[in-house]
Amino acid sequence: MQSSRPVPVRRTSRLPRGARRLQLLQAAQEVFVAHGFHAAAMDDIADRAGVSKPVLYQHFPGKRELYLALLEQQVTELTDRVREAMAGTEDNRQRVHGAVGAYFDFVDADGGAFRLVFESDLRNDDDVRTLVDRGNRACVEAIAEVIAGDTGSSPEQAHLLASGLTGLAETSARWWLAQKGTVSRDEAVSLMSALAWRGISRFPRVEGEPADPSVR
């Protein structure tokens, strides 16, 4: 985590409640990513947002509630990316590519908010763990539904395969981000989705269609 304090921002004019909430969440993201939950202060977040601390407390009763709201936003963002990858095509190879790409794009998004989901310093908090687990489960279920429907695998088998795919995608995306510049995003996603596809494509479709012959 960085040690520098956030740069104060000039007080902003009055905004509609929804717009103000989004502004506060963005400021909180910057502070939490830079300092972690424990070292962050509501004063820092208010300064970063350009509002008084009473305005901040009008929207969020405390630092923990603000953190949970931001975490929920990011968990939903990742879940939506994976679901869109599953729903965006009927081509299963493209689905695998899209699912892997969803994780790469999530970790590479501006602001480093993925750290709140994957590297939180508040993971021992029950509500934080519940939110993160819920997001992971939603991603796994979105992929498992397609695997079960196409292969006739049992729900347990489909969930295990989907868990393997999400684990591969998350771990490789985080490694790639730390090494960014050595391998392009597109090349990295192609490499990892090809690795995943070589395994998943060997499970024949329910209709009796053979596994992709190109992987033999």
Image: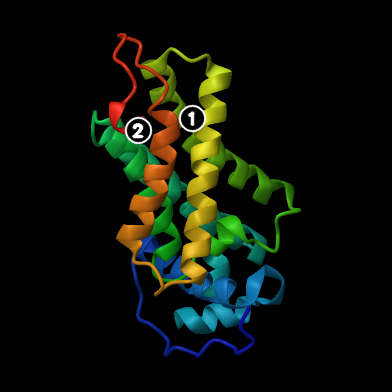
Quadrant where the image shows the C terminus: top left
Residue type beneath disc 2: Val
Q: Which residue is mark 1?
A: 141
- Image: 49 above or below 188: below
Density class for disc 2 (Cα within 10 Å; few <14, some 14-19, many ≥20) is few
Q: Nearer the viewer, residue 35 or 25?
A: 35
Colour scheme of the rendered structure:
rainbow
Q: Position of residue 67 (x, y in %)?
A: 60, 61
Q: Nearer the viewer, residue 117 or 191?
A: 191
- Image: 134 above or below 105: above
- Image: 13 above or below 138: below
Q: Which residue is mark 2?
A: 215
Q: Position of residue 155 (x, y in %)?
A: 53, 17
The residue depicted at 65 percent of the width and 43 percent of the height is 130
Density class for disc 1 (Cα within 10 Å; few <14, some 14-19, many ≥20) is some
Q: Quadrant of residue 92?
A: top left
Return the disc, 2 or 1, that comes first in the chain's sequence: 1
Q: Position of residue 212 (x, y in %)?
A: 31, 26
The residue depicted at 70 percent of the width and 77 percent of the height is 39
The residue depicted at 30 percent of the width and 9 percent of the height is 207
The residue depicted at 66 percent of the width and 68 percent of the height is 37
Q: Secondary structure at mark 2?
A: helix
Is residue 80 among what the camera can see? no
Quadrant where the image shows the N terminus: bottom right
User: Residue 212 vs residue 116: left or right?
Assistant: left
Q: How many marks?
A: 2
Residue type beneath disc 1: Glu
Q: Nearer the viewer, residue 58 or 47?
A: 47
